[in-house]
Amino acid sequence: KDERAALKDKIRRLLKEKNAVMVSHYYVHPDLQDLAEETGGIVSDSLEMARFGRDHSAQTLVVSGVRFMGETAKILSPEKTILMPDLDATCSLDLGCPIEEFSAFCDAHPDRTVVVYANTSAAVKARADWLVTSSCALDIVRALKDQGHKILWAPDRHLGDYIRRETGADMVFWNGACIVHDEFKAFELESLKKDHPNAKVLVHPESPADVIALADAVGSTSAILKAAQTLDAREFIVATDNGMMHKLRTLNPGKVFYEAPTAGNSATCKSCAHCPWMAMNGLAGVAQVLETGGNAIHVDPAIIPRARLPIDRMLAFTA
Ligand code: CIZ
Ligand code: SF4
């Protein structure tokens, strides 16, 4: 406990000394979420993390999250130093969408507008027309459909198919999935609903379709936070990374939040619904990179302008 307090003090001091600011994702450890907010940074989803990093005056950003978030920050602010506690913190969606195969897939569908999720490499972004996150994907695809576009969607097939069902857009899909959300199970969720008949079910759309079908509210992390505050209920079952529980509980004292069941977490595993890459972020890593300047994100300068285009479109659309 003392060690944590000492690390937090050290980070507070180093942030000032280095003119740095921290941005943390909702899925990282509560210590990193609280410290980011307390020191003038934010805790948020990848869309708002990107916008905040771009607009903040600090010359150094510490990004607690996964690699694509650091890369997006670098693409938007190539002149800034972007540090991450662990450069091996990646994402199954990013890993499952290598640029060579993805580029060939795009070449095979030249008539389609390429829409990719934020959870992708800089090279994949540089091949895309639009970037989206789960908080703006529906609106952007709906607008493209209304303008007559046919869509090539990558990489999360559950989110893509959810958007297709909601918008009726003509879409072809890359076959990717999030290893966390893909594990939520509809059968077990129905039985948990029976145990808590008054609970409302909040689901992130990276989850399978039969889990989404049981939801009272479907949406991004920010939409889930909003639903927990506005829906008329005291109890909620939440199908997203359990890192979200911290914000849900602190913003809603008196409400009760249960984790939706995954293949393993009902009895045997307390932390199945948690991203192993998000979990690589910790206080010690933050302190270390601030002190040494290690783990700086590099993106090939040759692809930055092209990778920036779909991100700028998204940020302008959601402004
Ligand atoms: O599942 C993720 O990694 C999410 C929700 C990213 C994001 O857009 O914040
Ligand atoms: Fe990727 Fe899923 Fe982890 Fe998010 S929670 S970083 S989508 S693997």
Image (cartoon, rainbow, N blue to C red):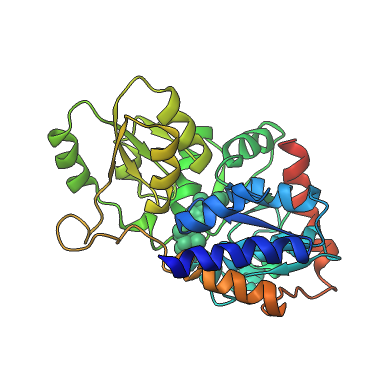
Q: Is residue 274 above or below residue 290?
A: above
Where is residue 185 shown, x and y percent of the image? Answer: 25, 51
Q: Residue at x 48, y 48 (%)?
A: 159
Q: Is residue 82 visible?
A: yes
Q: Residue at x 75, y 52 (%)?
A: 310
Q: Using the image as rendered, state which of residue 72 and residue 283 is in the foreground.
A: 283
The C terminus - image quarter: top right
Q: Quadrant of residue 134?
A: top right
Q: Using the image as rendered, state which of residue 162 and residue 151 is in the foreground.
A: 162
The N terminus - image quarter: bottom left
As drawn, the residue found furthest toward the top would be 232
Q: Using the image as rendered, state which of residue 62 and residue 192 is in the foreground.
A: 62
Where is residue 7 shown, x and y percent of the image? Answer: 54, 68
In the rendered structure, the answer to whether residue 253 lies left or right of residue 269 reads right
Q: Residue at x 32, y 37 (%)?
A: 213
In the rendered structure, the answer to whether residue 190 lies left or right of residue 79 reads left
Where is residue 153 shown, x and y percent of the image? Answer: 58, 53
Q: Is residue 259 above or below residue 14?
A: above
Where is residue 33 shown, x and y percent of the image? Answer: 53, 52
Q: Is residue 178 above or below residue 193?
A: below
